[in-house]
Image (spheres, helix red, strand yellow):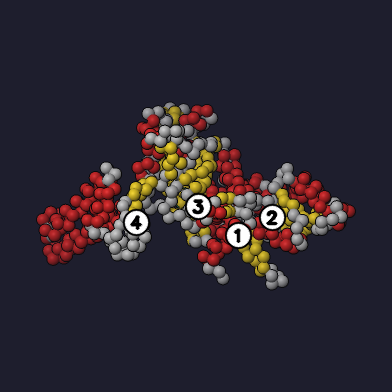
């Protein structure tokens, strides 16, 4: 039995060998946490996106799709809190080469002093028993006062340093507190750098600060700023949703685990605008609906679980993740958040434009509440791909590698082979391709023995292989082989379209996700 790490390595090498995913700019040794999708990967990814889009937009009369630009007015990110709160002050220890968040180092140091105070308090409590007055003790005890003064001084220095963005002072606090690296034990620190997870660039020819713009770290804000545009032009009535798929960018500090954590990735998000007070009802509705969508792909219900957030973000009043059993354990695949009216209110404040809805049923104007579903397309890809890659031992003791993708997502739906490269068989095979390609992605292959061609298509995840032999020329029948069962049937060429359609049609798969 291979261990988790080996399984994961296999997944990565299979994805490269068969044209699903390549490291970005590989000939230059790659770019960390950035990946390219190859000829097979792009199809699988496109099918996943479409599967989501149909379920969310096409199947819901009250959900509209948009495609907002990646660049947005910089004030967007001020309003959303990303400029102020998507920041980490970083410091490196020169000896261990380990990177830390400077704020965490200082907070941990303060916590240690607090623990000392608590120890004094506990000791005194024990000594004085019933008559102990903690407040008085804290106000008068010499050692407590001394330690508390230390804490107050550190925190006020730190607060002021952050307010003034004085990173040298942040470093000085670390030096003055004699904070050591837990790994090397040394105080050999680099300077502190403010690290915002947003990528920035400049727009226009003059590079002044006012021209700095950001690559969006989430697609959601493109939806919020268009809330009224879509509502008015689409005559949408609450509750309604706006959906979009698109690239997002985060300068992740710890970026590993292949396409699980990338610096450039794609999100599929939907913001559902509801009447205030009804948000929990819709939050629960979308939790169930999204889980049903995931399960419709047939990767196994036990591979998913909900994980409620214990600590909520400042804008949320309920939040959970749908976690998937990745090769490295259960990890977040999708987030479902009840975001209150935080975003719309913030954009109202910063833009000075009203972002309200007039509810004709209640005759009232209000800022809608929002329930968000946000899933990473690349993480979906990894979930599907890693779950589908199997090594099977066959009856004759040989093994085969098969990518048992949900057939609706398979990059190629059928491969057509002439048994031999002569006797007019390639021409018949090409004609079948010609007929099928209007409806499906199909491939032609005449290289190697048929058995090897089957194996290659198994590894690519192709649900059907169609073989043209000498009998075909006589009676217009072919063999069709099923990827998972490897069963072969003799069928008429005219039946092929129906057979494939029944198996791969999005409708048949999506019916399983219907509420
Ligand atoms: P994490 O805790 O894993 O960093 P997050 O909570 O920051 O994720 P959200 O901001 O909720 O993620 O983004 C929604 C979805 O976008 C996530 O559920 C995930 O599928 C995807 N996502 C977020 N960051 C990345 C990334 N760096 N690479 C790939 N997908 C990502």
- Of badges 1 and 2, nearer the viewer stands 1
Q: Report the Cα–Cα distance between label 4 and label 1.
A: 36 Å
Image quarter of the N terminus: bottom right
Image quarter of the C terminus: top right
Crowding around mark 2 (Cα neighbors within 10 Å: few <14, some 14 to 19, many 20+) is: many
Could you tell which of marks 3 and 4 lies nearer the N-terminus? 3
Query: Which residue is disc 3 drawn over?
Result: 31
Asked if disc 4 and disc 1 are in contact, CB closer than 8 Å, the reply is no
Query: Residue at coordinates 49% horizontally, 39% vertically from top-left?
Result: 70
x and y percent of residue 319 in the render?
Answer: 42, 48
Label 1 residue SS: helix
Query: Residue at coordinates 17% horizontally, 57% vertically from top-left?
Result: 147
Query: Which residue is disc 2 drawn over?
Result: 463
Crowding around mark 1 (Cα neighbors within 10 Å: few <14, some 14 to 19, many 20+) is: some
Label 4 residue SS: strand
- Of badges 2 and 3, nearer the viewer stands 3
Query: Which residue is disc 4 drawn over?
Result: 92
Query: Which residue is disc 1 drawn over?
Result: 14
Asked if disc 4 and disc 2 are in contact, CB closer than 8 Å, the reply is no
Label 3 residue SS: loop
x and y percent of residue 155 in the render?
Answer: 23, 50
Q: Quadrant of residue 141?
A: bottom left
Query: Residue at coordinates 43% horizontally, 37% vertically from top-left?
Result: 202
Q: Report the Cα–Cα distance between label 3 and label 1.
A: 20 Å
> Which residue reaches farthest bottom?
397
Q: Report the Cα–Cα distance between label 2 and label 3.
A: 34 Å
Could you tell which of marks 4 and 1 lies nearer the N-terminus? 1
């Amino acid at each position: 039995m291979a261990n988790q790490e080996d399984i994961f390595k296999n997944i990565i090498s299979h994805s490269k060998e068969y044209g699903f995913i390549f490291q970005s700019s590989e000939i230059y040794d790659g770019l960390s946490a950035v990946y390219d999708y190859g000829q097979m990967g792009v199809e699988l990814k496109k099918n996943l996106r479409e599967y989501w889009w149909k379920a969310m937009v096409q199947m819901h009369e009250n959900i509209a799709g948009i495609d907002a630009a990646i660049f947005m007015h910089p004030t967007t990110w001020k309003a959303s809190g990303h400029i102020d709160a998507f920041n980490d002050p970083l410091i490196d220890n020169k000896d261990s080469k380990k990177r830390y968040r400077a704020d965490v180092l200082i907070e941990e140091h303060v916590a240690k002093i607090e623990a000392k105070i608590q120890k004094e308090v506990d000791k005194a409590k024990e000594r004085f028993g019933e008559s102990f007055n903690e407040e008085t003790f804290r106000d008068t005890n010499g050692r407590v006062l001394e330690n508390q003064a230390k804490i107050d001084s550190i925190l006020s220095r730190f607060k002021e340093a952050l307010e003034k963005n004085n990173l040298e002072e942040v470093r000085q606090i670390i030096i003055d507190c004699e904070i050591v690296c837990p790994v090397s034990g040394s105080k050999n620190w680099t300077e502190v750098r403010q690290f915002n997870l947003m990528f920035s660039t400049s727009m226009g020819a003059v590079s002044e600060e006012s021209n700095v713009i950001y690559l969006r770290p989430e697609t959601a804000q493109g939806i919020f700023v268009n809330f009224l545009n879509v509502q008015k032009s689409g005559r949408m009535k609450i509750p309604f949703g706006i959906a979009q798929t698109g690239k997002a960018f985060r300068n992740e500090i710890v970026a590993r685990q292949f396409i699980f954590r990338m610096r450039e990735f794609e999100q599929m998000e939907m913001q559902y605008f509801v009447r205030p007070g009804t948000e929990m009802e819709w939050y629960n509705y979308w939790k169930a609906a999204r889980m049903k969508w995931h399960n419709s792909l047939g990767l196994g219900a036990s591979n998913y679980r909900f994980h409620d957030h214990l600590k909520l973000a400042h804008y949320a009043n309920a939040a959970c993740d749908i976690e998937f059993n990745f090769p490295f354990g259960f990890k977040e695949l999708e987030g479902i958040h009840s975001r209150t009216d935080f975003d719309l209110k913030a954009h109202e404040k910063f833009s000075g434009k009203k972002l309200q809805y007039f509810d004709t049923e209640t005759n009232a104007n209000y800022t809608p509440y929002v329930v968000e579903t946000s899933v990473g397309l690349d993480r979906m890809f990894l979930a599907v791909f890693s779950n589908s890659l199997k090594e099977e031992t066959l009856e004759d003791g040989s093994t085969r590698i098969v990518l048992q993708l949900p057939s609706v997502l398979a990059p190629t739906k059928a491969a057509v082979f002439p048994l031999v490269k002569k006797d007019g068989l390639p021409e018949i095979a090409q004609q079948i391709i010609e007929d099928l390609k209007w409806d499906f992605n199909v491939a032609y292959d005449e290289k190697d023995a048929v058995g090897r061609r089957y194996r290659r298509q198994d590894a690519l995840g192709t649900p059907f292989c169609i073989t043209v032999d000498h009998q075909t020329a006589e009676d217009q029948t072919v063999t069709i082989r099923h990827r998972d069962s490897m069963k072969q049937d003799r069928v008429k060429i005219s039946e092929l379209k129906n057979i494939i359609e029944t198996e791969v049609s999005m409708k048949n798969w999506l019916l399983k996700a219907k509420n």
